[in-house]
Image (cartoon, rainbow, N blue to C red):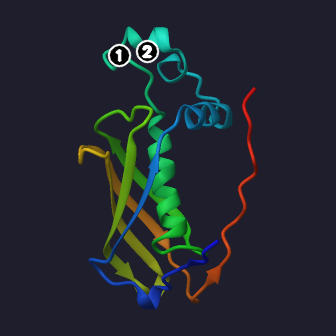
């Protein structure tokens, strides 16, 4: 397992970018619904979803938001950062099997308070813009290299 390394405030520069990708699975949709309580049938009921303009189940919008969080936590600034705020607008749905890549770009640094502003864009495997927004993150002061947390094994009946 590789170590997670952060970018402390002294190593962050305007224009710096980092990306994080994940493919949405049916299990992700079910787990997100269970964790969030969002049981909207457009996510979970294939028959209902077929009657919507999407034609099939779609992922929760905030699943994409969670990928922004993962990019911040694991890529830029990485471990030790504190997610302070987020604006996010959704442009297109994410369907099961879509791979979403979140790209973070540093647009402003307030070094005294360690505040970093990030433009956030999420695109699918076809390059279509899924979501965009702006995040503010308090960057860590110290360099950190750490083992990632272990995820539990989850099985479905």
Q: Quadrant of the C terminus?
A: top right
The percent coordinates of residue 151 (x first, y second) are 71, 55
Q: Are marks 1 and 2 in contact (CB under 8 Å)?
A: yes
Tell me: residue 99, above or below residue 156. below
Determine crowd level at label 2: few under 14, some 14-19, many 20+ residues with C-alpha closer than 10 A.
some
Hey, which quadrant is residue 26 in on the image? top right
Horizontal side of residue 90 vs 79, given as left or right: left
Horizontal side of residue 130 vs 2, given as left or right: left
Horizontal side of residue 150 vs 63, given as left or right: right
Q: Does dot 2 land on a helix, a strand or a loop?
A: helix
Which residue is pictured at 67% across the width and 32% down the height? 34
Q: Quadrant of the N terminus?
A: bottom right
The CA span between labels 1 and 2 is 6 Å
Tell me: residue 22, above or below residue 33. below
The percent coordinates of residue 24 (x first, y second) are 48, 40
Q: Nearer the viewer, residue 140 or 85?
A: 140
Residue 110 is labelled as none
Which residue is pictured at 45% across the width and 56% down the height? 68
Hey, which quadrant is residue 99 in on the image? top left
Q: Which residue is mark 1?
A: 55
The percent coordinates of residue 150 (x first, y second) are 72, 61
Q: Which residue is mark 2?
A: 49
Which residue is pictured at 40% across the width and 32% down the height? 95
Q: Does dot 1 land on a helix, a strand or a loop?
A: loop
Q: Earlier in the sequence, mark 1 or mark 2?
A: 2
Q: Nearer the viewer, residue 44 or 61?
A: 44
Which residue is pictured at 33% across the width and 43% down the height? 89
Determine crowd level at label 1: few under 14, some 14-19, many 20+ residues with C-alpha closer than 10 A.
few
The percent coordinates of residue 90 (x first, y second) are 33, 39
């Amino acid at each position: 397992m590789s170590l997670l390394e952060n970018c402390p405030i002294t190593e962050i520069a305007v224009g710096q970018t980092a990306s994080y990708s994940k493919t949405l699975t049916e299990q992700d949709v079910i787990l997100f619904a269970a964790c969030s309580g969002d049981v909207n049938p457009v996510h979970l009921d294939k028959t209902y979803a077929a009657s919507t303009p999407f034609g099939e189940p779609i992922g929760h919008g905030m699943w994409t938001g969670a990928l922004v969080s993962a990019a911040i936590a694991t890529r830029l600034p990485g471990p030790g950062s504190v997610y302070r705020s987020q604006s996010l607008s959704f442009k297109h749905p994410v369907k099961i099997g879509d791979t979403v890549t979140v790209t973070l770009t540093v647009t402003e640094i307030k070094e005294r308070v360690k505040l970093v502003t990030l433009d956030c864009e999420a695109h699918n495997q076809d390059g279509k813009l899924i979501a965009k927004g702006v995040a503010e993150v308090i960057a860590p002061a110290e360099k950190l290299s750490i083992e990632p947390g272990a995820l539990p094994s989850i099985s479905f009946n």
